[in-house]
Image (cartoon, rainbow, N blue to C red):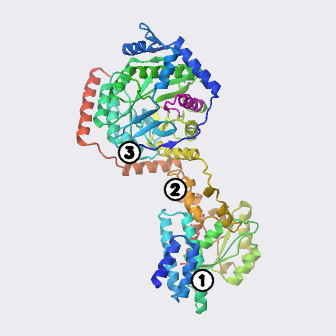
């Protein structure tokens, strides 16, 4: 059985049909006239065979529109992942929506408010909490893509993290590899008998790096889906205009989909996007806010047009602590992302972009996810919910509905029961120590970490992962990485 | 026979079924079963629901449903007791109402139902109750507790007016005063000189118990 996630009916649009068509046409023009660089000879061979014009010296590929259109049509409409525990398998696509955790380099320590490299116990706490939270449907990468040097030095953090995720969650996973370490990553997933998605990261403008193409080839070989995405910062590596950023990133992604479908027809692709702006004062990327929300919704619309599943890294914030700005920016984008029909949303635990994450924030986000999905569920209108009979029975005052069977039957279906958000009386709140959302989430997070247990991997799998990690570590260190 | 009737009486409370509660109370009377025994069954069932609520397994609609079913059965048994020349054992007598100019009564009704289910004898004066009406009721019923509700910020001060009127008539020492309602806070309750306050209807039961020393 697969995880159910949520169903989003009647998604909203931010582009008119005419605007969507113009973005599409512009994308085809960029691919035909400007082209995209693929920094690997095998990719150039595959695309040349498929009918592209290839300049080998520049590694530049120009795409005939028919081939792009055809590849978008042939790209499967579902991405299926197999988890350690089959109840966590996911089927991404259509009108189904899943939440997954945010990924960051550092821990936001909710006790001190400081940022630091996560230690092993921090990664374990985050993993345990994410495995527990019911609205974390699938793992992106865990909360952290990094760990303290003393645990796994340098690039070893990648294979260490993959093995760690396999050991500490039963949910379906995504994996990532850079600079040629993909053989060990793939081997680990195969040893554990799971089918992950593999992240493939582009380098805008209009470039797919060679070491990421190696990930595409390894995924094709292993029959794993890929999740390509490009980190945009509008005004620097893409046009300052939101529409121009859409056109360029749409071209980059369509070029990758064309490669995938030419390399291995029917290869499953989860179209990703990471839409940011360039901060024009300090040259730091601007994460959260209305622009990211609009781009996110536009991406849902673009990929829905092709019936290609889509995920976004856009529920971000520029806030460096867990605060009002963070909540506002994350929720703003989340609501629009959900309403526009995203298939998978990176959400739980993010504090400041890729730089900070916190399992305490993940506990808070789980409540927010429930609130947003309550909105999506909408107002149920049936004879029973219209309640004319019970209104008639209760009548004017002093009648009341509290003791009506109709109330007992319906209230809990209509009313969300947050796990952490405070809905108590003022006096109860005083009596319980004046705890705000953050304090309550800290308590809950500690409780989950203490009580939730993830079943261990079978001994032989565990030993195999350790063996693969040692082999990876030896090679990575011999490379000086 | 009494077992079946009493079982059904208990079931009626646990099913939050007022009609059944009343029906099985009548059956108990018809079959000349001991009314005090029937009351005990009802009290025990309501306690069971109360415990479920305290454990956060049950919710307000369950509690109110059970308590309201309870209040449907009680008058039938009280009538039977009266015909036998006896009275129901109560924890104390309460006069309750919503103050003048305020017609919100759900909170007040919940307090009435919970106090009744707890074993208090409650006289409900309704809503929009004038200060003089509260005074007359205190004189007539000689309650242990006068309970006043006010939902609106503008009407909460009426609670103060009633307490002043009680003082003026020399009745203040005869009765404990508890206040509640959406507009009332612990600070406000202290300011108007009330003896007890709780922000929730269910909390009001413990306040009442404390005020009568139960």
Asked whether the viewer can see residue A283, the reply is no
In reply to whether residue A292 is colored magenta, the answer given is yes
On whether disc 3 and disc 2 are found on a single subunit, the reply is yes
Question: How far apart in space, not on screen, are marks 2 and 1 (Cα)?
Answer: 45 Å
> What residue sits 56% from the left and 80% below the top?
B91
Circle 1 — which element? helix
Q: Is residue A447 left or right of residue A371?
A: left
Q: Which residue is mark 3?
A: A87
> In this view of the protein, which residue sits in the foreground, A97 or B46?
A97
Q: Are marks 2 and 1 in contact (CB under 8 Å)?
A: no
Q: Chain of mark 3?
A: A
Q: Which mark is residue B152?
A: none
Where on the picture, by quarter, is residue B145?
bottom right
Q: Position of residue A452 (x, y in %)?
A: 37, 50
Q: Position of residue B146 (x, y in %)?
A: 66, 75
> What residue sits 55% from the left and 36% below the top?
A341
Q: Position of residue B41 (x, y in %)?
A: 49, 79
- Which quadrant does the C terminus of chain A fall into? top left
Please give the range of residues in magenta: A291-314
Q: Which residue is mark 1?
A: B76
Number of other residues with Cα within 10 Å of mark 1, as a class: few under 14, some 14 to 19, many 20 or more = many
Q: Which residue is mark 2?
A: A433
A28 is higher (above) or lower (below) than B135: above
Where on the picture, by quarter, is residue A405?
bottom right
On whether disc 2 and disc 1 are found on a single subunit, the reply is no
- Which quadrant does the N terminus of chain A fall into? top left
Number of other residues with Cα within 10 Å of mark 2, as a class: few under 14, some 14 to 19, many 20 or more = few
In reply to whether residue B136 is colored magenta, the answer given is no
Where on the picture, by quarter, is residue A40?
top left
């Amino acid at each position: 059985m697969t995880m159910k996630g949520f169903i989003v009916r009647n998604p909203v649009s931010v582009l008119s049909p005419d605007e969507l068509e113009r973005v599409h046409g512009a994308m085809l023009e960029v691919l035909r006239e400007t082209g995209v660089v693929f920094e690997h000879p095998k990719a150039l061979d595959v695309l040349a065979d498929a009918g592209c014009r290839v300049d080998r010296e520049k590694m530049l590929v120009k795409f005939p529109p028919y081939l792009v259109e055809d590849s978008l049509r042939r790209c499967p409409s579902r991405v299926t992942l197999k988890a350690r525990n089959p109840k966590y398998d996911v089927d991404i696509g259509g009108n189904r929506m899943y939440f997954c955790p945010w990924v960051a380099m550092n821990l936001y320590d909710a006790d001190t408010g400081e940022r630091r490299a996560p230690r092993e116990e921090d990664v374990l706490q985050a993993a345990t909490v994410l495995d527990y939270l019911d609205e974390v449907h699938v793992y992106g990468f865990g909360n952290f893509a990094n760990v303290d040097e003393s645990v796994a030095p340098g690039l070893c953090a990648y294979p260490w993290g993959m093995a760690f995720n396999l050991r500490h969650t039963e949910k379906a996973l995504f994996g990532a590899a850079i600079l040629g370490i993909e053989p060990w990553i793939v081997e680990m997933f195969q040893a554990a008998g799971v089918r992950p998605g593999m992240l493939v990261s582009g380098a805008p403008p209009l470039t797919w790096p060679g070491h990421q193409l190696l990930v595409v080839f390894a995924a094709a070989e292993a029959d794993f889906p890929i999740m390509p995405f490009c980190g945009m910062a509008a005004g620097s590596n893409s046009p300052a205009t939101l529409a121009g950023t859409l056109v360029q990133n749409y071209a980059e992604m369509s070029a990758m989909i064309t490669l995938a479908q030419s390399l291995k027809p029917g290869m499953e692709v989860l179209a990703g996007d990471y839409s940011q702006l360039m901060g024009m004062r300090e040259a730091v990327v601007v994460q959260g806010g209305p622009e990211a929300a609009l781009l996110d919704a536009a991406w849902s619309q673009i990929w829905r047009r092709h019936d290609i599943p889509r995920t976004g890294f856009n529920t971000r914030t520029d806030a460096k602590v867990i605060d009002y700005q963070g909540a506002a920016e994350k929720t703003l984008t989340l609501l629009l992302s959900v309403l526009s029909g995203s298939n998978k949303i990176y959400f739980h635990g993010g504090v400041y972009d890729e730089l900070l994450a916190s399992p305490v924030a993940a506990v808070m986000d789980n409540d927010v996810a429930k609130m947003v999905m309550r909105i999506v569920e909408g107002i149920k209108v049936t004879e029973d919910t219209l309640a004319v009979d019970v209104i008639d029975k209760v009548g004017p005052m002093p009648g009341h509905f509290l003791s009506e069977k109709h109330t007992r039957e319906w209230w809990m279906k209509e009313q969300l029961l947050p796990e952490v958000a405070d809905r108590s009386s003022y006096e109860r709140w005083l009596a319980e120590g004046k705890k705000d959302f953050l304090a309550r989430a800290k308590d809950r997070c500690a409780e989950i970490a203490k009580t939730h247990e993830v079943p261990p991997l079978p001994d032989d799998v565990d030993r195999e992962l350790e063996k693969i990690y040692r082999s990876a570590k030896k090679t990575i260190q011999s490379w000086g990485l | 026979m009494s077992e079946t009737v009493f079982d059904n009486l208990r079931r009626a409370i646990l099913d939050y079924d007022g009609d059944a509660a009343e029906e099985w109370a009548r059956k108990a009377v018809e079959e000349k079963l001991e009314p005090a025994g029937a009351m005990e069954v009802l009290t025990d069932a309501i306690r069971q629901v109360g415990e479920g609520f305290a454990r956060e397994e049950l919710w307000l609609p369950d509690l109110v449903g059970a308590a309201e079913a309870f209040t449907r059965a009680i008058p039938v048994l009280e009538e039977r007791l009266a015909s036998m020349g006896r009275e129901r054992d109560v924890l104390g007598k309460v006069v309750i109402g919503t103050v003048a100019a305020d017609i919100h009564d759900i909170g007040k009704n919940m307090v009435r139902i919970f106090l009744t289910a707890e074993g208090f004898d409650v006289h409900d004066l309704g809503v929009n109750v004038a200060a003089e009406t509260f005074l007359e009721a205190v004189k007539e019923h000689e309650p242990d507790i006068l309970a006043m509700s006010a939902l609106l910020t503008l009407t909460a001060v009426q609670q103060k007016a009633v307490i002043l009127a009680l003082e003026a008539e020399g009745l203040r020492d005869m009765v404990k005063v508890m206040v509640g309602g959406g507009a009332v806070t612990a600070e406000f309750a202290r300011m108007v000189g009330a003896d007890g306050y709780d922000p929730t209807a269910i909390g009001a039961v413990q306040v009442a118990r404390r005020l009568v020393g139960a």
